[in-house]
Amino acid sequence: MPTKGRNIIVLGTSAGGLEALDQLVGQLPTDLPASIFIVQHMAAHNSGEPLLRRLNRHKAFQPKLAEDGDRFRPGRIYIAPPDNHLLVKKDKMLVTKGARENRHRPAIDPLFRSAAVAHGARVIGVVLTGMLDDGTAGLMAIKRCGGVTVVQDPRDAAYSGMPMNALNNVDVDFCVALAEMGPLLTRLVSQLHRKSKGVPSDIRTEAVIAERVLSDVSQVNGLGDQVPYNCPGCGGVLWEMDTPGEKRYRCHTGHSYTGPALLASQSEKIRGDAVDLFEDVRGTQESPHEHGQGFASLARQKRASSAGQGDPGLHRPHSRHVAGARIRRTPRHPHARKGTDGGTAPSKVHTMRGWP
């Protein structure tokens, strides 16, 4: 694998991404001397086949779902599997079931961050169409480690949220329409990369958290200060991170949120609580022998099986403010199931598997 040019391209997209990726890959030369890694937000039950079928039209790149421990090669496309994060090391890939970031697994930020730590200035990070702001913190990590950042022009994107948030928070190197992006990436790959910068400690710490899937309060304490909000994914304490760009929040189990993502998650939790309350009241009027189980139980099971969300839990909402937006604090209900931390931060490291 050449070392003089930029040979790692990481792409992140969400809504509208299928068509955008197809169009972009179709612009690239088949002998491109770079490995391409893609995160497309998808539901946990999605097989990934629709994206694979679309990109298989470009057979020279041999698109495939990434597999844990596989070595990567230039001129190939690797796609994050459903319900797993894709991480890049020096010469191989890791596929992990770590905690969701920005409500997603796979998420864009973990991929971008891992590439920045492992490959520095040889990385090109690209954010395409999508809603909300996954990918912004990852682009910031690439920029701080000496890599190049590229964003689709929001006016050209099917959904402008992700590109616009990136432009608002990162000093992006290039903002171009999709039709111009293929030639731009080809040119950037052929150029000598600039000198890599030292990896900032906060970026390295977050990369370690994603890779090892650990619960470590001391690590998160080093990233910021505790705030009086609960994590929607696990009910644990949140830390407000002291990092450049927009405000972000992380819990000790690995869940990570931007302000808008946290607001959206808390809002969904509150709506779920309201449905639970309604169905509990309604269920008292039904015979358990006639229906087998109450409406509330069915409602909770349905939400628990929904992709991209944590356990529903039972909470009473309390108003708080995050990053200038009104959100809800959701302390644990006294009868809700407690995790290993009992709703508070643990005092030692615990290995976590299969986080919601």
Image (cartoon, rainbow, N blue to C red):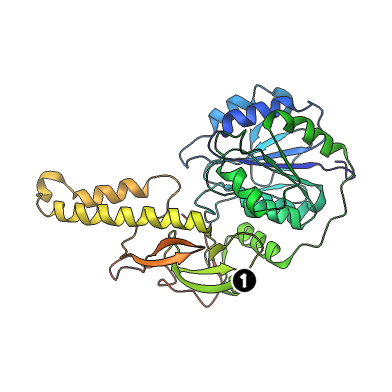
Apparent side of residue 276 relative to residue 25 in the rendered image (left or right): left
- The residue most toward the bottom is 347
Residue 229 sits in quarter: bottom left
User: Is residue 124 placed above or below 251 in the rendered structure?
Assistant: above
Residue 230 sits in quarter: bottom left
Q: Is residue 354 visible?
A: no
Q: Which residue carries the number 1 mark?
A: 219
**Which quadrant would the N terminus be assigned to in this image?**
top right
Whole-percent x, y for residue 223 in the image: 62, 70
Residue 247 sits in quarter: bottom right
Q: Is residue 163 visible?
A: yes
Whole-percent x, y for residue 204 in the image: 70, 63
- Comparing 80 with 182, the one in front is 182
- Comparing 273 with 64, the one in front is 273
Judged from the image, the secondary structure of the residue bearing numbered disc 1 is helix
Whole-percent x, y for residue 155 in the image: 61, 35
Q: Residue at x 82, y 51 (%)?
A: 121
Apparent side of residue 125 relative to residue 194 in the rendered image (left or right): left
Q: Residue at x 42, y 61 (%)?
A: 326
